[in-house]
Amino acid sequence: LRAPRSPATARARSRLLDRVDLHCRLAWLTATQLADAQRAAEDAGMEIGIVHDLAVGVHPAGADTWAQGDLFVHGMSVGAPPDAFNARGQDWGLPPWRPDALAATGYAAFRGLLRGLLAHAGALRIDHVMGLFRLWWVPEGRPPTDGTYVAYDAEAMLAVLVLEAHRAGAVVVGEDLGTVEPGVREALARRGVLGTSVLWFERDWGGDGRPLAPEKWRQDCLATATTHDLPSTAARLTGDHVTLRHRLGLLTRTLEEELTEDVTGTAEWLALLARLRMLPEGDGDEPAAVRAVHRFLAATPARMIGVWLPDTVGDRRPQNLPGTWDQYPNWRLPIADPEGHPVTLEEITASPRLHALMEVLRPRRSRTAPPGERPV
């Protein structure tokens, strides 16, 4: 059954017809609900509506690798080399595309993937967009530090991406964080692909290293306080994320060293917010600081602002810790309040923290455009 077009698979398909039909119906229902959700968003006045996410890879035992096995490299995993946030590097456990097979098939699989994602969406966020240029391949059973970069035909990949986004009238946002080779951001910008700027990482790296003033931020980006791979804003403000990584054995320095650096960096940002009168004097509680962070984002020229939903209720836990497998319940944590109690969708929409945060962002005017020429 490893070969999707083998006689044995055909016989199994006939024998399991009811289960096959069930999953086909579930896929159809999902597509129908996505279409309804996008239509409802547009009817409510949202210019973009649903923003889909293109992951950096697929499960090694999933449908993609089974149906299109010749397009993937088995025995290899996609990851990332060591950087400032993940000193040990990362192994994501996902098989990489074969660049030669993609080219030989005219990038048909990549094109089909994009069309499916853009069918019911106003925008697409591409996780680890640098993967269109090169990917860090890690041999199975080896640490991420033993990996190496393998190049892809970025011109071809970007051409397919921009063409499909234009046909769908969709905005494209690339997550360009971490190790980015020279020229990548410029290549994306030339094609109207927005980047991602996370507040805590935006510093004057070519100068004194201090937090970057709002007017100096790039325009063609999604500005945000965090992402699914980073600590929530509440955790960042309290240092909870450092102690969590220490508890899981993910730090390469002592806890004291990491906490000292983290506290210093956070204090520099809070001092800037106070100088800009975005953090009222004497109003240093956590919800006020979270609002101040988003007030700062609203003052940047960024075309889009992203709000991490757990930030709207004060959740302190990360949804995903890159580089972990069974050490942490990645993608399995319901959104919770500051005490860790799960909250329902109705409780989120009624949350005073959410409404106070939205008031901070309400005055901001829309500034989105490429590549589908749609404002946010």
Image (tube, rainbow, N blue to C red):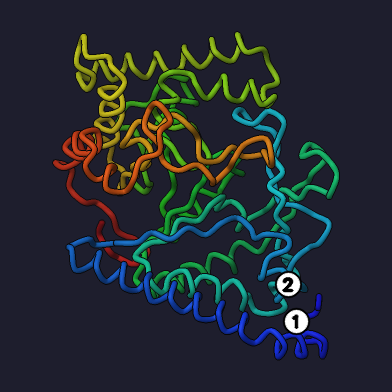
The secondary structure type at the circle numbered 2 is: helix
According to the picture, the residue beneath numbered tag 1 turns out to be 4
The answer to whether 178 appears left or right of 42 in the picture is: right
**Rendered image quadrant of residue 330:** top right
- Foreground: 130 or 350? 350
Residue placed furthest toward the left? 363
Compared with 173, 315 (above or below) is: above
Kindly identify the amino acid type of the residue bearing the numbered disc 2. Trp
Compared with 157, 321 (above or below) is: above
Can you give x and y, in whole percent of width and height, for residue 115 in the image?
48, 75
Can you give x and y, in whole percent of width and height, for residue 331 in the image?
54, 46
According to the picture, the residue beneath numbered tag 2 turns out to be 66
Can you give x and y, in whole percent of width and height, for residue 75 in the image?
84, 57
Image quarter where the C terminus lies is bottom left
Q: Are there few (<14), some (14-19), or many (20+) residues within 10 Å of tag 1? A: some
The secondary structure type at the circle numbered 1 is: loop
- Foreground: 373 or 31? 31
Can you give x and y, in whole percent of width and height, for residue 127 in the image?
53, 52
**Rendered image quadrant of residue 249:** top right
- Which label's residue is closer to the chain start, 1 or 2? 1
The answer to whether 44 appears left or right of 121 in the picture is: left
- Rendered residue at 61%/25% (across/down): 245
Q: Are there few (<14), some (14-19), or many (20+) residues within 10 Å of tag 2? A: some
Kindly identify the amino acid type of the residue bearing the numbered disc 1. Pro
Compared with 1, 293 (above or below) is: above
**Rendered image quadrant of residue 52:** bottom left
> Are the residues tagged 1 and 2 within 8 Å (C-beta)?
yes
